[in-house]
Image: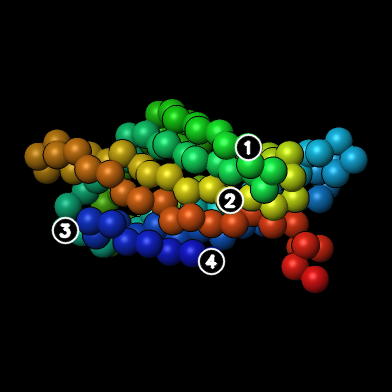
Amino acid sequence: MVTTITEGVKVSIETIYQPEYSNPANDHFMFAYKVSIENMTNYAIRLMSRHWYIFDSNGAKREVEGEGVVGQQPVIEPGHTHEYVSGCNLKTDMGNMKGEYHMIRLLDNANFNVQIPEFYLIAPYRLN
């Protein structure tokens, strides 16, 4: 698990290789990742959008931007955590992701960005 804290918002990520959805012979490797976003501030926040940077070990780079996460723009109250699971496919058995969430502080509608820590997507057999 990797974790970072930006402006009082803690983001933690766990990854899981999914061999049942992967097809190495066709350069298709599927990974799931679980994200935990903990609001450690004294005010409610809303996650408005995300911006991901995705890297394959062959040098390919992608960017993904969009509203919310998995179809939601959750409000996270002080002391609460929002969790979700999503996935990413790569053309190689190793890669990494990082990014940021665009948030709004509901008290005064102030905008701020929260860093998503860099994390690695690695098929377990590559670790031997």
Q: Which residue is mark 2?
A: 96
Between marks 3 and 4, how big is the CA–CA gap? 26 Å
The amino acid type found where label 2 is placed reads Asn
- SS of the residue under disc 1: loop
Kindly indicate whether the residue at mark 3 contacts the one at mark 1 (C-beta within 8 angstroms).
Answer: no
For the residues labelled 1 and 3, the Cα–Cα distance comes to 40 Å
> Which of the marked residues, 2 or 1, is nearer the chain's N terminus?
1
Mark 3 closeness class: few <14, some 14–19, many ≥20 residues within 10 Å: few
Give whichever of 86, 75 is nearer the camera: 86
Q: Nearer the viewer, mark 4 or mark 1?
A: 1
Residue drawn at (23%, 56%) of the image: 7
Residue 41 at what x, y percent from top left? 20, 59
Query: Dividing the picture into quarters, in which one does residue 87 lie?
Result: top right
Q: State the residue at coordinates (55%, 41%).
A: 54
Q: Where 125 sits versus 51, above or below?
A: below
User: Disc 3 or 2, which lies upstream in sequence?
Assistant: 3
Q: Which residue was labeled with disc 1?
A: 60
**Which is closer to the viewer, label 3 or label 4?**
4
Q: Is residue 21 visible?
A: no
